[in-house]
Structure formats: structure tokens, C-alpha cells
Amino acid sequence: MDPTKLISEPVETKKWEKRVGSAAAAPSYELVSFKELPEYMKDNEFILNYYRVNWPLKEAFFSLFRWHNETLNVWTHLLGFVLFLGLTLANLIEVPQVSGLIAFFTRSFPMSGDINVSQDLFVVSELQRTTTNLIDLMSESDVTPVTRWPFFVFLAGSMFCLLSSSICHLFSCHSHHLSLSLLRLDFTGITTMIITSFFPPVYYVFQCDPKWQFIYLGGITVLGMFTIITMLSPALSTKKFRGFRALLFSSMALFGIIPGFHAAIVNWSNPRRNVTLAYESAMAMFYMMGTLFYVSRVPERFKPGWFDLAGHSHQIFHVLVVMGALAHYGASLVFLDWRHGHSC
Ligand SMILES: [Zn+2]
């Protein structure tokens, strides 16, 4: 008997087993049709194919680079997140408070020519100088630097919403349990974005009237908390409650009409009124259109199966959300710029 045969045989067998093994394992990572889905995944009956079911986390992660019916849902909000991250960094680089602080420390640094008397006198004079500088800085800060945190609160809320949405769409195919948790994360993200969107306009418009800042920002935060708590109920994550969820989100957004009208009346003679109103109207239009697509599931309901990979309602909704957030970013820049020249 040829001894090499004895060695090569198990190798061959192993290769074959591996091939069979991988062929047997492959179907679980294949895309399936709507009919084959477990009940919990049956959300949109007009999307007929290209579903991932019970994929391990690793496979789900790498499906970022594969075509399935969630690919564009993931990428639309992932790119939106990257865009807002870029905008945040671009705005962070230019921080006037930092240059003010550097100037303060440079001015209070002792110069060699000053030390011509005793050490005690030097300490006293430096203390006086530091105090004067501090008072200078405080009085300057009353006039020039504008409070920027409300603007960054909005940017952070938008980034959280866009990133949690991408994560939800990417990993929901893993298991029923995880999909429920991720759906709640997604709804929490949307609610957070709505709440944080109120911060720049309400804060800057009512900067000289903190009572209204408190009423409006407190009101939307309470409404948002109620929405998040309601969404934690697993039953409300199901497709049956799609309309109810849309109603909750819309009522939060509609709450904005009250401070919106108030702000327009207070600033009726402000030359920037029309610019901000145009931006905010564009935002409202994008969000309303997005909600309509989300609820109606147009266009896929007219041609089931045609829009499985590209062009279905949820993808259009995602794009409109990013556009709405960008319009609101534009309005926030105008508010911020206006407050640079108009303190109380
Ligand atoms: Zn989504």
C-alpha cells in the first residue's frame, strides 16, 4: 500500500467535510423571503425579499458591505452621523472662550521688569492685576462670547439619533430579544433628537426671558420623557402601533408650534425673522413628509417587491430626517450668529 495514500486520505476527507459543513451552514446566512420570516420580523409585507434572519453579530456587522433590504437604511443614517460629526468638529475648533482664556493667562503672566521691589509687594501687585484681569474677562464675557452649549446639545442629540438608528437597522436581524432592545434605542434616539432640537431656538430667542426658556425646554423634556417611557413597553414596538408611534413623535414636534409663534411675535421686527422661518419651515416640511412616508409605506405598497433593495418608504424617511436636521442646523447657525451681536 502506498504510504502517501494513508496520509492524503484523511486530508481529502477533511476537505470534503469542510466543504459540506460550510455548504450546510451557508443557508443560515442566505437572504430569505418575507414568507420565511419569524413572526416578530414581519413588519412590512410589501418588502418581499432580501431579509437577514437570526444572523450572528459578526455576520450582521459585515452585512454593512452586502446588499440586503436594510443596507441603505443603515448607510443613510451612518453617513448622516458622519456629516453631523464633521459639523460638530468644525464648530468645536472655533471656540472663542478658549482664546479669551489664553489671553487672560498670558496677561497675568509676570514680566521680568515688574520685579523691582520686594517679593511681598510683587505678590500683592500680581494679585491686584489678576483680579483686574478677571473682572475684565467677566465684563467682556457679558458682551461678546455667546453661549454655545445649546447648539452643541442639538448636534449631540442628532448624532445620537442617527448612530442608534444605524445600529438598530444593522443588528436587529440577530435575535428577537436584541431587535426589541434596539427598536427601543431607535425610538429613544428619535425622541432625543426632537427634544434637543428645541434647545438652540428656544434658548437663543428667549435668552433675555429665562422664564420662557424654562417653560418651553422643561415642557418638551417632560413630553419626551413620557414618550420614552411609553416606548419602553414591548407591545408598542410592534407594527400594530406604527400609527401611534408616529402620533407621539408628531405631537412632540407639533409642540414646537407654540414657542414658534411666540418667537415670531417677539421678534416680528427682527431682520433675520424670514431666514429662520424659511429654515424652520423647510425642517417642518421634511419631517412631515418623512412621517407620511413612514406611515403610508409608499411606494412599495403599489408595487410590492420592486423597492426591496432601494427606494422603499423607510429609506426615503431616513433621507428626509437628515435633510430636516440639516435645515434646523442652518436655522441654529442664524440664531447663534444673531446672539453674537445681541446680548441682553
Ligand atoms: Zn429607521
Image (cartoon, rainbow, N blue to C red):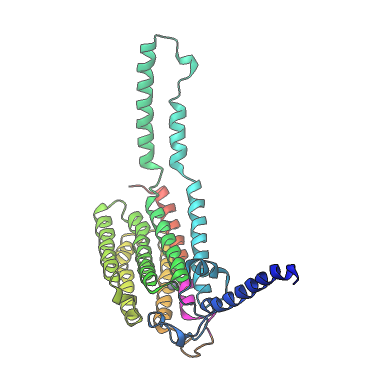
Q: Nearer the viewer, residue 23 or 287?
A: 23
Query: Residue drawn 32% across and 52% down?
Result: 207
Residue 342 visible to the viewer: yes
Q: Judge whether 135 appears above or below 27 on screen.
A: above
Total labels: the figure holds: 0
Q: Is residue 61 left or right of residue 180?
A: right
Q: Position of residue 175 (x, y in %)?
A: 41, 73
Q: Is residue 173 left or right of residue 260?
A: right
Q: Nearer the viewer, residue 313 or 289?
A: 313
Q: Judge whether 183 appears above or below 126 on screen.
A: below
Q: Is residue 255 magenta?
A: no
Q: Picture quarter containing residue 215?
A: bottom left
Q: Position of residue 70 (x, y in %)?
A: 50, 75
Q: Nearer the viewer, residue 230 or 218?
A: 230
Q: Where's ligand 1: which quadrant?
A: bottom left
Q: Nearer the viewer, residue 234 or 38?
A: 38
Q: Judge whether 302 appears above or below 63 on screen.
A: below
Q: Position of residue 301 (x, y in %)?
A: 46, 88
Q: Picture quarter containing residue 144?
A: top left
Q: Is residue 312 magenta?
A: yes
Query: Residue drawn 72% across and 71% down?
Result: 5
Magenta part of the chain: 307-319
Q: Position of residue 263 (x, y in %)?
A: 32, 62
Query: Residue drawn 56% across and 77% down?
Result: 26
- The residue positioned farthest toward the front in the image shown: 1
- The residue positioned farthest toward the right in the image shown: 2
